[in-house]
Image (spheres, helix red, strand yellow):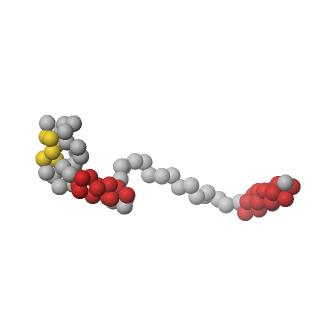
Amino acid sequence: MEVKCPICAKQVVWSPESEFRPFCSKKCQLIDLGEWAAEDRKIAGKPAEDATPKHIDVEEIEAMLAEQSDDFFKH
């Protein structure tokens, strides 16, 4: 069976002897790796949910920080 190299579209024999399959060469393999590292290639997925709270309760945050501060100085 033959497949096209994802980078240059050159035909590649799909077998254990094809060291860089599905790529035709080490060069194309490294180009692909660089594209993933640069986030030029991505796997589609669900969009991340917005982790920002809709309502910020300043008093609740201040109480939590005061509690953490009290715990820190007790030790």
Left or right side of 22 for 52: right
Q: Residue furthest right?
A: 74
- Which image quarter: residue 59? bottom right
Q: Nearer the viewer, residue 53 or 44?
A: 44
The residue lying at 19 percent from left, 42 percent from top is: 18
46 versus 27 height, above or below: above
Query: Which residue is at a point 17% across and 55% down the rendered structure image?
Result: 8
Q: Give the position of the C terminus as an image quadrant.
A: bottom right
Q: Quadrant of the N terminus?
A: top left
Question: In the figure, residue 56 lies in which quadrant?
Answer: bottom right
User: What is the tally of numbered marks visible in this picture?
Assistant: 0
63 w.r.t. 12: above or below? below
Q: Is residue 14 above or below residue 74?
A: above
Q: Quadrant of residue 57?
A: bottom right
62, 40: nearer the viewer: 40
Instruction: Point out residue 29 in the picture as x, y percentages from the top left corner.
Output: 26, 52
In this rendering, position of residue 13 left or right of residue 47? left
* Left or right, residue 44 beside residue 50: left
User: How far across and down, in percent of the image, does residue 44 sit?
Assistant: 36, 49
Which residue does the image show at 15% across and 52% down from the upper left? 9
Question: Quick check: 58 left or right of 30?
Answer: right
Residue 54: x and y in percent read: 61, 58
Judging depth in this view, the residue of 18 and 71 nearest the camera is: 18
Q: Is residue 69 visible?
A: yes
Say whether residue 59 is visible.
no
Q: Relative to the observer, which residue lies in front, 50 or 35?
A: 35
